[in-house]
């Protein structure tokens, strides 16, 4: 938690914000390509951005065509209930549409859960080195975040279960986790969910689900009937290649969905995003190809890191957490060479950098730049 800036001036308009808002440490996004180009006088085309875990291929041709066709009708508000997208998701996952909440990115779904279920004085449990939005969204509600020590950089589910108190309303679990890429086996996950009291929501964040090998995917949507306190969140920002359009979704019990919909903005998912997401869901082959390209990219990065004598955390997602020592210095050296990765000191990992798997040439650019950056 960042120190609370004092309300220095009697007329400081920020002084009226609650302490728990003023003490929020803002989310640090990956550096935009245009910003680095400006700062270092580089050509945008020469910059490689491997900093935000996007799919380097972008969306597939079917999705691009669907977006292009939908631009004729931008004067009307989108369908606030996302009928077509919910129908497609319901059919895909064998769940009812009334248990689906669409979000402006899955980030929005995470925020909606905290808005609907946390009040000042409540608590939320999450792991150390887990996705930054869990503490941010918790703190923005005036609730108390309980950060549980990690085990081998991943979630220690037994310790997280023990951290739940009478004040706990939400437990966040990221699978795979960002920024560590760690993964929890379905059996362990199922046992954990069964052990959590029914009046505590388990938010299972599966943003990287599509990058898992099929045998590693948990049948989590099917667990909701048995565990009405389970919320599964997913996104079109990662393997589906639609990060710029902002669309994600949560699968949950209809009574929980009803609560989220009460605090949701009526038109939180734009029309192009809805059309694109339906098309993306239908293009199963494209996602499979992206997974295969990612798998090869992980292997290429691992080979290059091994040759540089570096260590990393084995990843089940589309990024690798690499130990480089003085990560701040190495990050700057990479920037000079036109390569943007993600420093993760704010995740309690000051010696590490997170690199997103790119296209083959991008991965090689990163490895070459890293070798040069580490040279004495
Ligand atoms: C674990 C995890 N959850 C959720 C998100 C949010 O993604 P989006 O809002 O684009 O769906 C991210 C993005 O990096 C993530 O890493």
Image (cartoon, rainbow, N blue to C red):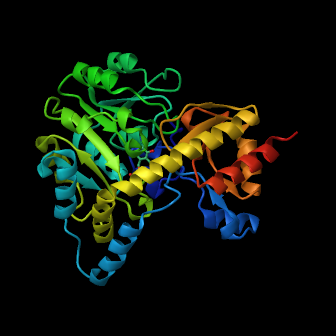
Q: Residue at x 48, y 47 (%)?
A: 292
Q: Is residue 64 left or right of residue 57?
A: left
How far from the left and from the top, in percent, is residue 208? 41, 43
Q: Is residue 274 above or below residue 312?
A: below
Q: Quadrant of the C terminus?
A: top right
Q: Is residue 105 left or right of residue 264?
A: right
Q: Is residue 79 above or below residue 290?
A: below
How far from the left and from the top, in percent, is residue 255? 11, 42
How far from the left and from the top, in percent, is residue 92? 22, 50
Q: Is residue 338 above or below residue 188?
A: below
How far from the left and from the top, in percent, is residue 79? 19, 68
- Nearer to the camera, 336 or 223: 223
Figure disc tally: 0
Q: Is residue 81 visible?
A: no
Q: Residue at x 26, y 25 (%)?
A: 193
- Nearer to the camera, 278 or 111: 278
């Amino acid at each position: 938690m960042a120190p609370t800036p004092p309300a220095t001036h009697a007329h400081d308009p920020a002084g009226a914000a609650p302490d728990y808002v003023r003490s929020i440490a803002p989310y640090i996004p990956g550096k935009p390509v245009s910003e680095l180009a400006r700062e270092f006088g580089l050509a945008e085309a020469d910059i490689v951005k491997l900093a935000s875990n996007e799919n380097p291929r972008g969306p597939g041709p079917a999705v691009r065509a669907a977006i292009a066709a939908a631009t004729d009708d931008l004067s009307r508000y989108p369908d606030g209930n996302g009928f077509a997208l919910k129908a497609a998701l319901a059919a895909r996952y064998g769940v009812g549409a009334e248990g689906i909440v669409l979000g402006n990115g899955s980030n929005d779904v995470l925020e909606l859960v905290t808005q609907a279920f946390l009040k000042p004085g409540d608590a939320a449990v999450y792991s150390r080195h887990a996705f930054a939005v869990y503490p941010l969204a918790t703190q923005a509600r005036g609730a108390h975040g309980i950060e549980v020590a990690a085990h081998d950089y991943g979630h220690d589910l037994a310790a997280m279960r023990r951290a739940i108190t009478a004040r706990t309303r939400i437990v966040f679990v990221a699978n795979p986790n960002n920024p560590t890429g760690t993964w929890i086996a379905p059996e362990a996950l199922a046992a954990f969910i069964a052990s959590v009291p029914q009046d505590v929501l388990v938010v299972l964040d599966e943003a990287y689900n599509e990058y898992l090998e099929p045998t590693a995917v948990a049948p989590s949507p099917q667990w909701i009937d048995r565990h009405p306190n389970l919320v599964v969140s997913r996104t079109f920002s990662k393997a589906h290649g639609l990060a710029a359009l902002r669309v994600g979704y949560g699968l949950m019990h209809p009574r929980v969905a009803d609560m989220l919909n009460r605090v949701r903005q009526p038109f939180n998912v734009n029309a192009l995003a809805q059309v694109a997401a339906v098309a993306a869901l239908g293009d199963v082959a494209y996602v499979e190809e992206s997974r295969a390209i990612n798998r090869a990219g992980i292997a290429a990065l691992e080979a290059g890191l091994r040759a540089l004598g570096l260590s990393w955390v084995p990843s089940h997602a589309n990024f690798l957490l690499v130990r480089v020592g003085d990560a701040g210095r190495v990050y700057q050296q990479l920037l000079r060479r036109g390569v943007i990765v993600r420093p993760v000191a704010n995740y309690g990992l000051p010696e590490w950098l997170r690199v997103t798997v790119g296209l083959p040439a991008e991965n090689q650019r990163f490895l070459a730049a890293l070798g040069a950056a580490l040279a004495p």
